[in-house]
RNA sequence: GGGGUCGUAGCUCAGCUUGGUUAGAGCGCCUGCCUGUCACGCAGGAGGUCGCGAGUUCGAUCCUCGUCGGCCCCGCCA
């Protein structure tokens, strides 16, 4: 038995067709406009806003109570739907041609004045929004992000179901694996001193599902990585995880493109190209200084090593002779940057690890070089001429190893387009990046580590390199990049025990260790593992881009701050000694 | 682990450069007036540990150091 009237309509659905009907609405007081006589209230729920009217002449009782209404009070109101008088329609909102003349008002709950206005047009500090997330989540813009996220889940589920993929849940408490990101550990009460790990991804499980014959698997699943955060990265995030047997790169890419096409068509009514361009890792690095190039704008990197090699400037010539490169970007209209602005840029690239920044200012009659003490006018002219620099251009040159110089230039390129506001709106540039190196030598660990993950298959034609030059072998891996963001990544996997063991040994993992860490997978491969491969979509990032958000925090209901804290519930927190005792844990 | 930046009224910010009178504005809040508003309007009012701690100084919101917290980036993120 309810003590108040349940709604008969939501705050988003009244139209002229309802005029003359008596309706009941429930919701939150969004705005109060008390004109002394008439009181107008915008009533809000997640479907929209409806203007309700309290008139002292028509319904004295309701009007009297309405005087006490304040922001965020929860109310139930009943009244007659009226057409609004001409000239008072509000075409900004979908219910703006009607209003409800209230004769019955129940205050279901009062509310303290919120610590910040819930209007979309007010910018609120993010820490405050996160502390009072339940209020922040009432704002229509935040709600619409989460609703778009919901819609994306539904499109993805329907898509993968339609083409024969089976959704299977995999464990959240799993075995810790040594490779890759730092694991979140969960102590075992029943097994003193032993720990579960939260999955960095369901990688091994989905491969084993392929061995089991499930053929086509997908899952929308939380993954956990105990690493530092970024605007597009937090320790728990959501993947659309996909794996497929008897598939090669093209099959996975085709299915991925289909999923993206479906999502963008349904959610944004945007037609993506039927296939996405493919760029090798090497090209991506050399042109954009990144393995996730943003191709919406130019400002591409150019290689000046041939001029630098013959230069009298030893910093340049030595680095090239040692196998490094001298490369740069040519920024239009930047020649008018002042010395102090350029000093700031120099400090910036130094903070990225560059030795320094050499710049060439191209004016109408000459080329001025910041290292003119060491670089002759002829050389400066040659640098400028090589890629047809125009008056007004500023050429920024970085020297270093191939990897380092290009990475720094890639970061500098993004910094410059942001400063100069050169990023075009409304572009959706999808791009596959392929031919990643399989392994990379870790100076820190003094061994090869997997660039993608240790289950990624080498390219067939590079198999022989595994013996001679493992660092040069390429992987059957592919990343999907959208506007400079990695939104999906995957690979064709190793499916034989022999190759998998070989990979472990290349990575300096002893057979006994491989057996203890990954024995279950190696064992599974002995019993008829089909060739297989897959991909995982970074769902948070995709929604972030589709909603135009600057951070994934805006598309996650309860996100962590950049220090990994949850400001609303104050996690992580201390625990009782009793809990620690049960878990056999002592704090150092 | 490193770099940058921010922290002043409930909110968004100014003030700090060059230390010194009573620390201001808009919004919100409270009170009054107001019957067609819609980010209502008008009048009045309340509201401050200048993040926290130490130092320099006759005197610190302001300078210095430390610390806590937010954001961005590098490293890290198979």
Image: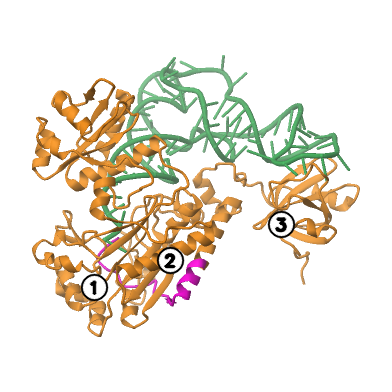
Q: What stretch is highlighted in magenta?
A: A155-181
> Secondary structure under badge 3?
loop
Q: Residue A11 — which label?
A: 3
Whether residue A577 appears in this view of the structure is no
Q: Where is residue A419 in the image (x, y as percent from the top left)?
A: 39, 35
- The image quadrant of residue A479 is bottom left
| Residue at the outermost right position | A57
Is label 2 in a helix, a strand or a loop? helix
Let me know if marks 1 and 3 both belong to one chain: yes
Is residue A354 shown above or below A292? above
> Mark 1 highlights which residue?
A494
Labels 3 & 2 near each other (Cβ < 8 A): no
Disc ID at residue A258: 2
Name the residue rendered at 21%, 43% in the picture: A405
Among the two numbered marks 1 and 3 on one chain, the one whose residue lies closer to the N terminus:
3
Q: What secondary structure predominates along the stretch shown in magenta?
A: loop
Query: In the figure, what tint was chain A given?
Result: orange
């Amino acid at each position: 038995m309810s003590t108040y009237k349940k709604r008969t309509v939501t705050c988003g659905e009244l139209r002229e067709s309802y005029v003359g009907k008596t309706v009941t609405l429930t919701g939150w007081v969004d705005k109060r406009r008390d004109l002394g006589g008439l009181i107008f209230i915008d009533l809000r729920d997640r479907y929209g806003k409806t203007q309700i009217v309290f008139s002292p002449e028509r319904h004295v009782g309701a009007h009297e109570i309405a005087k006490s209404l304040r922001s965020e009070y929860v109310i139930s109101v009943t009244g007659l739907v009226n057409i609004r008088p001409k000239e008072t329609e509000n075409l900004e909102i979908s219910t703006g041609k009607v209003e409800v003349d209230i004769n019955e008002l129940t205050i279901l709950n009062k509310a303290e004045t919120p610590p910040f206005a819930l209007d979309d047009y007010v910018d609120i500090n993010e820490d405050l929004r996160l502390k009072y997330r339940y209020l922040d989540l009432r704002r229509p813009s935040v709600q619409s992000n989460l609703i778009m996220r919901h819609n994306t889940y539904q499109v993805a589920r329907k898509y993968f179901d339609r083409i024969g993929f089976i959704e299977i849940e995999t464990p959240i408490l799993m075995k810790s694996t040594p490779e890759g990101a730092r694991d979140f550990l969960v102590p075992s009460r029943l097994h003193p001193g032993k720990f579960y790990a939260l999955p960095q991804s369901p990688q091994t499980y989905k491969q084993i599902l392929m061995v089991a014959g499930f053929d086509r698997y997908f899952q929308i699943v939380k993954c956990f990585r105990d690493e530092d955060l970024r605007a597009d990265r937090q320790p728990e995030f959501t993947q659309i995880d996909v794996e497929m047997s008897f598939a090669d790169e093209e099959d996975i890419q085709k299915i991925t493109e289909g999923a993206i096409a479906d999502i963008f068509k349904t959610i944004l009514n945007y037609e993506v190209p039927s296939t996405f361009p493919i760029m090798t890792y090497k090209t991506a690095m050399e042109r954009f200084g990144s393995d996730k190039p943003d191709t919406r704008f130019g400002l591409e990197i150019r290689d000046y090593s041939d001029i630098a090699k013959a230069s009298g400037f030893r910093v340049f010539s030595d680095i090239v002779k040692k196998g490094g490169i001298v490369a740069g970007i040519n920024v239009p209209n930047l020649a008018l940057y002042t010395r102090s602005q350029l000093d700031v840029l120099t400090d910036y690239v130094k903070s990225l690890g560059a030795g320094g920044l050499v710049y060439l200012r191209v004016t109408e009659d000459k080329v001025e070089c910041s290292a003119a003490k060491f670089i002759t006018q002829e050389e400066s002219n040659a640098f400028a001429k090589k890629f047809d620099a125009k008056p007004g251009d500023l050429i920024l040159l970085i020297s270093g190893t191939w990897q380092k110089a290009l990475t720094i230039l890639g970061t500098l390129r993004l910094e410059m387009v942001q400063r100069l506001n050169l990023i075009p709106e409304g572009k959706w540039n999808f791009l596959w990046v392929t031919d990643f190196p399989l392994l990379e030598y870790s100076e820190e660990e003094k061994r090869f580590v997997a660039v993608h993950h240790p289950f990624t298959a080498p390219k067939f034609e590079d198999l022989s390199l595994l013996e001679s030059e493992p660092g040069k072998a390429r992987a059957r891996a592919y990343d999907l990049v959208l506007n400079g963001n990695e939104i999906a990544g995957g690979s064709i996997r190793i499916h034989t025990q022999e190759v998998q063991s070989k990979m472990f040994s290349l990575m300096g993992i002893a057979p006994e260790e491989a057996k203890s860490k990954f024995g279950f997978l190696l064992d599974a491969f002995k019993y008829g593992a089909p060739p297989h491969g897959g991909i995982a979509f970074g769902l948070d990032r995709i929604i972030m881009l589709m909603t135009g958000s600057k951070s994934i925090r805006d598309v996650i209901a309860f996100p962590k701050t950049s220090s990994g804290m949850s400001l609303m519930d104050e996690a992580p927190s201390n625990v009782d000694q009793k809990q620690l005792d049960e878990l056999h844990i002592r704090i150092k």
